Image: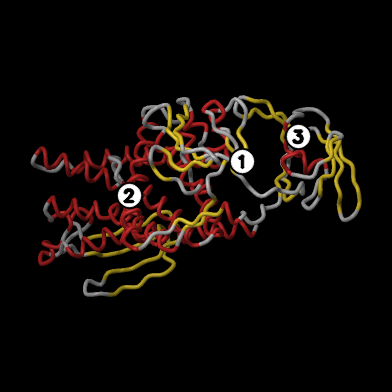
């Protein structure tokens, strides 16, 4: 319950901040364009707090549903406008001014992402050096020739000081071709390039972020003791009576001291009874577990629904800190914002043409989960999360879907080409279509969220 509450608070804080940034972009440019702003609202629905202030008596409001916001401007299409204020109505502005006001929302999201990344790089983002621990047999990594103790120093000439950098670089590179070039350093051997071949379904297979698992790689991590840290409700471990804190001593007649040994035995016995001995508060207890049969990357394995204790601290020689000076951080932050924007746009494009599954869409539940995780990991990690979501909001809002900012910009483009605006009735019909598309996408995203929970 505590984790859910923390994730919810982190999600509301993140979304509220990013919505405020987006709407402030519209507000700021509208005010400088001479347009009168009637209301600035963060959220929809019933007002939780509001205040009217400023020379235009603008109403600032915080509403109950924190899933959006809006800036209401003086507009003849939404009510009668006094003659002396006609010049301040949005609909009376030039095409250039209207376009600038609409574009300002997404633009501020991109600018915020740059600021967040800049601050993250100045503070320093901690990570783990991409040194390979184990390589799964017959995996893409094994077929490429990667081995334990190899360090991935670059992907497609992009330096990769941490595993997070490796993941993003591989996801970016996979769009260009069916292979990604890695630069690898092996102890006692000079650096060399390796071509990692990936099939066309790679993006779909890593929708849950398990890039390394799909490649067949495992990072070097501290050895985990064979102690149950968590049992998942409704799964085999809980039904059999295992509890958090139980120390596994043996499984199927094999002495167990490390978590990897325990996992290997369970995975090797799908649907088969496995005698297990655990130590609980000084007492020895015996169980018989029958792991569920699960298909994982084309392989049938056993699972019981148990997780280990959190790993201990990463050894110092495997720790990495990505930190830059203020100027270099600004350049890197701008580049990273651009790269993330392009990656997001390309992912959406692949979804539209059917090359990438819609299962990659994430809804508020998944986003809240990551909000809580990154917030608990520290400020730099949370800033990275905010930057990624801000980029996503910027890109999504620029899509040419009526109701979104990109839809309005599309209408303005047509107006510029034909020399006059589209009829209001046509725009209303198109906005209804756009709203239906958004509701469909939100339904798919929510379905994906619940599907992940039930997996």
Q: Which quadrant of the structure image shows residue 344? A: top left
User: In the structure shown, which secondary structural element does the residue marked by tag 3 occupy?
Assistant: helix
> x, y (%) of residue 324?
39, 59
> x, y (%) of residue 426?
21, 38
**Front position in the image: 357 or 46:** 357
Q: Of the residues under marks 2 and 3, which one precedes in the sequence?
A: 3
* Label ID, residue 266: 3
- Above or below residue 40? Residue 272 is above
**Residue 348 placement, left or right of 321:** left
**Residue 159 placement, left or right of 225:** left
Q: Residue lying farthest left?
A: 419
The C terminus sits in image quarter:
top right
> x, y (%) of residue 345?
34, 39
**Can you identify the residue that label 1 sits on?**
133
Callout 3–callout 1 Cβ contact below 8 Å: no
Q: Nearer the viewer, mark 2 or mark 3?
A: 2
Q: CA distance from mark 2 to mark 3?
A: 45 Å
Q: Residues within 10 Å of mark 2 (few under 14, many from 20)?
A: some
Q: Which quadrant of the structure image shows residue 452? A: top right
Q: Nearer the viewer, mark 2 or mark 1?
A: 1
Q: Is residue 216 visible?
A: yes
- Above or below residue 72? Residue 201 is above
């Amino acid at each position: 319950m505590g984790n859910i509450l923390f994730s919810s608070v982190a999600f509301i804080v993140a979304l509220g901040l990013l919505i405020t940034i987006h709407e402030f972009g519209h507000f700021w440019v509208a005010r400088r364009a001479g347009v009168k702003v009637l209301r600035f609202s963060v959220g929809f629905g019933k007002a939780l707090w509001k205040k009217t202030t400023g020379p235009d008596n603008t109403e600032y409001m915080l509403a109950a549903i924190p899933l959006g916001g809006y800036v209401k401007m003086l507009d003849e299409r939404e009510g009668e406008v006094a003659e002396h204020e006609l010049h301040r109505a949005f609909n009376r502005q030039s095409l250039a001014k209207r376009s600038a006001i609409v574009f300002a929302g997404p633009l501020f999201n991109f600018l915020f992402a740059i600021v967040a990344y800049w601050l993250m790089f100045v503070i320093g983002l901690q990570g783990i050096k991409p040194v390979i621990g184990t390589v799964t047999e017959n995996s893409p990594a094994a077929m490429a020739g990667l081995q334990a103790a190899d360090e991935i120093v670059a992907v497609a000439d992009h330096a990769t000081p941490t595993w997070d950098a490796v993941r993003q670089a591989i996801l970016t590179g996979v769009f260009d071709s069916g292979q990604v070039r890695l630069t690898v350093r092996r102890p006692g051997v000079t650096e060399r390039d390796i071509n990692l071949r990936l099939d066309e379904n790679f993006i779909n297979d890593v929708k849950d972020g398990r890039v390394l698992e799909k490649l067949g790689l495992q990072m070097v991590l501290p050895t985990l003791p064979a102690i149950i840290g968590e049992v998942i409700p409704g799964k085999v471990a809980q039904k059999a009576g295992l509890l958090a804190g139980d120390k596994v001593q043996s499984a199927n007649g094999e002495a167990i001291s490390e978590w990897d040994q325990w996992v290997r035995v369970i995975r090797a016995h799908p649907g088969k009874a496995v005698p297990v001995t655990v130590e609980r508060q000084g007492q020895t207890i015996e169980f018989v577990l029958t792991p569920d049969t699960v298909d994982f990357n084309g392989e049938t394995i056993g699972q019981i629904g148990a997780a280990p204790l959190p790993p201990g601290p990463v050894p110092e020689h495997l720790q990495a800190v990505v930190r830059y000076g203020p100027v270099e951080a600004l350049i890197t932050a701008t580049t990273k914002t651009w790269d993330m924007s392009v990656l997001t746009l390309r992912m959406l494009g692949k979804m539209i043409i059917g090359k990438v599954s819609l299962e990659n869409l994430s809804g508020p539940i998944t986003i809240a989960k990551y909000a809580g995780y990154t917030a608990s990991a520290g400020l730099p990690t949370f800033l990275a999360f905010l930057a990624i979501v801000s980029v996503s909001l910027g890109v999504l809002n620029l899509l040419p879907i009526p109701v979104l900012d990109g839809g309005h910009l599309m209408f303005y483009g047509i107006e510029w080409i034909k020399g006059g605006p589209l009829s209001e009735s046509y725009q209303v019909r198109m906005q209804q279509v756009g709203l239906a598309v958004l509701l469909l996408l939100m339904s798919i995203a929510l379905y994906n969220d619940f599907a992940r929970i039930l997996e």
